[in-house]
Amino acid sequence: MAEAHQAVAFQFTVTPDGVDFRLSREALKHVYLSGINSWKKRLIRIKNGILRGVYPGSPTSWLVVIMATVGSSFCNVDISLGLVSCIQRCLPQGCGPYQTPQTRALLSMAIFSTGVWVTGIFFFRQTLKLLLCYHGWMFEMHGKTSNLTRIWAMCIRLLSSRHPMLYSFQTSLPKLPVPRVSATIQRDLVLIKNTDVQAARLGNIIHAMIMYRRKLDREEIKPVMALGIVPMCSYQMERMFNTTRIPGKDTDVLQHLSDSRHVAVYHKGRFFKLWLYEGARLLKPQDLEMQFQRILDDPSPPQPGEEKLAALTAGGRVEWAQARQAFFSSGKNKAALEAIERAAFFVALDEESYSYDPEDEASLSLYGKALLHGNCYNRWFDKSFTLISFKNGQLGLNAEHAWADAPIIGHLWEFVLGTDSFHLGYTETGHCLGKPNPALAPPTRLQWDIPKQCQAVIESSYQVAKALADDVELYCFQFLPFGKGLIKKCRTSPDAFVQIALQLAHFRDRGKFCLTYEASMTRMFREGRTETVRSCTSESTAFVQAMMEGSHTKADLRDLFQKAAKKHQNMYRLAMTGAGIDRHLFCLYLVSKYLGVSSPFLAEVLSEPWRLSTSQIPQSQIRMFDPEQHPNHLGAGGGFGPVADDGYGVSYMIAGENTIFFHISSKFSSSETNAQRFGNHIRKALLDIADLFQVPKAYS
């Protein structure tokens, strides 16, 4: 009860003698500190808004322009060509601040200088936007840069040389173009174990996550730049924290809060609210370790209906929306649900232990499947992401896809793992450094009153989710013979090499070709997300058929492969530069539905399922350490389920010079697919293509 009383700033009691007020100094102190912290954040946002609004200008550059104008006036040089005198004549006459000629002259020069400064900013922004519309550099061979691209790169560096903040380039990024209809139709660290103390690992990781959020709020994170000069859109990062997908009967919505000072935690069927701050101070890793250990040591049982509650987020969306309105719109259920939905993110403390052992191939698949869906009720799938902690201190993430794409959550994960390993560290016994504050109030159990009717809906959602999860086969493996180092010796892009190998592997697996989806990012445009690369091309099928025939020389096969690789690289570049076809086709489909127009063409091209859905996971977006000096600090990337019932989902990460990680999914219910069988075909296809170039490989 002591913690509950501390949470009330004042109490009053009405007696026959009057009203008795009792004030809690501690609570008032927290309210005061919270207010101060809130105003600090507002001021930081205002400051960042101003700096971002005048980029590439700055308040300093404004003062320089004014000083130059005033200085030239004292030297009897009118750099304004008479505009200062004109402005001075237009100023109001009479007594007041404009009384003396000197004051009027200074004010006129300040107005002129501000106009020049603003015009300069506008000119620089428009010039930068025009420069960023040039994408010819993407279509040039490595080492064969044209003079035009060299001049373009120099101009880009010149216009963006001042240190930008995270969102400085947003207004300068071009909008994603709409192609002509005719053009559309014609065409984690898995090898390193820092500690096996579950609570300690969480202490460091969550502290690092909130450090990242603070940098994000202050726009101290550097924008991601292609080739180090072309800025990528940062819009998706705004909703990384404090975001929840809210179910609706017609459509879901994303709820994003400007701030959240707690996380929601799930352990052994109980939900907890854990504060991340004490007043205005972020809890240190050792304090967070203590708080998580308190949850792990809590012996209280789940309340009726609480254990499987999160299954509502894994079942049907309409059923979840109806249950939310019927059972969670008032009372303690509403308050408890809001504590989850308004949390910075969700944390799941699992009782099982998973890790990757290179000597045990199945270990990575089991690890990945636990992260993908858990037991279907120990993840809150509506949160922007769930941080999953296993009993042995290993970790992973489960991310909701509506708010962002994989590179965004990967950016956070790289920062967090790098901070954990190279900046925070642990004691020799595996605990967080420093002594915790035992006076901190323990985490709060969320209270529920879940009736039998709601428990029935929860169980129904659980059964739906469990059937889906049990049907997913996930096969993950680390390909060790080679990585991008060898592929580059074949004079082709690593992505094209893998994609063509996937086509060969799929034909060997299924005996036919299929519509293939590869995700390409369009973040060179403002608010751009992804476009589709249709990897199954006539050139790639010609190479595969020649490989299957077995009668072609290596020289002929190499030539066919290079043609297929060149075609794939060109299609990928077109997709990245806004000339893809699938987002355009989808928009045309939506417009046709809105207008009530039937289109046999759209019905045909959009009806075929993506039986091979693929995606490359980026790595080393943040260079927090030298991978050559720390070769074991590798992440395995992530994965997803199959898009089609009789298809495959393939995610891969080219994790350095000498290794590639694959995540392959399919459905047990399909008699035509088998994830492990397909994985073996991928291995062989990669080796067979490498043999065409007779490049030595390191087998293991």
Image: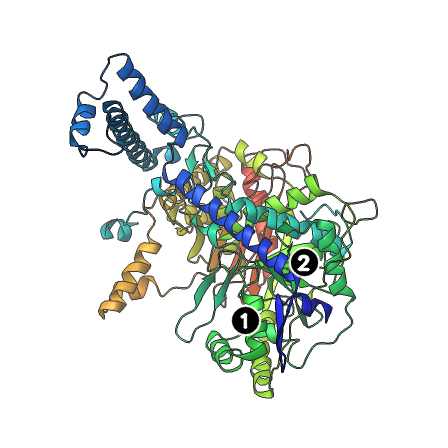
Q: What's the CA distance linking mark 2 and mark 1?
A: 22 Å
Residue 585: quarter of image: bottom left
- The location of residue 692, given as percent across then percent down, is 54, 37
Question: Quick check: 515 left or right of 292?
Answer: left
Name which quarter of the figure residue 376 lies in: bottom right
Q: Does 56 sit above or below residue 375?
A: above
Image location (x, y in percent) of residue 605: 32, 61
Looking at the image, tell me whether mark 2 or mark 1 is earlier in sequence order. Answer: 1
Give the amino acid at mark 1: Thr
SS for tag 2? Answer: helix
Q: Residue furthest right?
A: 429
Seen from the viewer's position, the closer of residues 678 and 575 is 575
Residue at 33% x, 46% y is: 578
Give the image location of residue 322, x and y in percent.
47, 80
In this rendered view, identify the residue nearer to me: 44 or 446.
44
Q: Closer to us: mark 2 or mark 1?
A: 1
- Per the image, the residue denoted by label 2 is 367
Q: Residue placed at 48% from the left, 65% from the top?
A: 245
In the rendered view, would you say 649 is above or below 212?
below
Q: Quadrant of the N terminus?
A: bottom right
Quadrant where the image shows the C terminus: top right
The residue lying toward the viewer, choosing from 639 and 351, is 351
Is 103 above or below relative to 71?
A: below
Residue holding disc 1 = 313
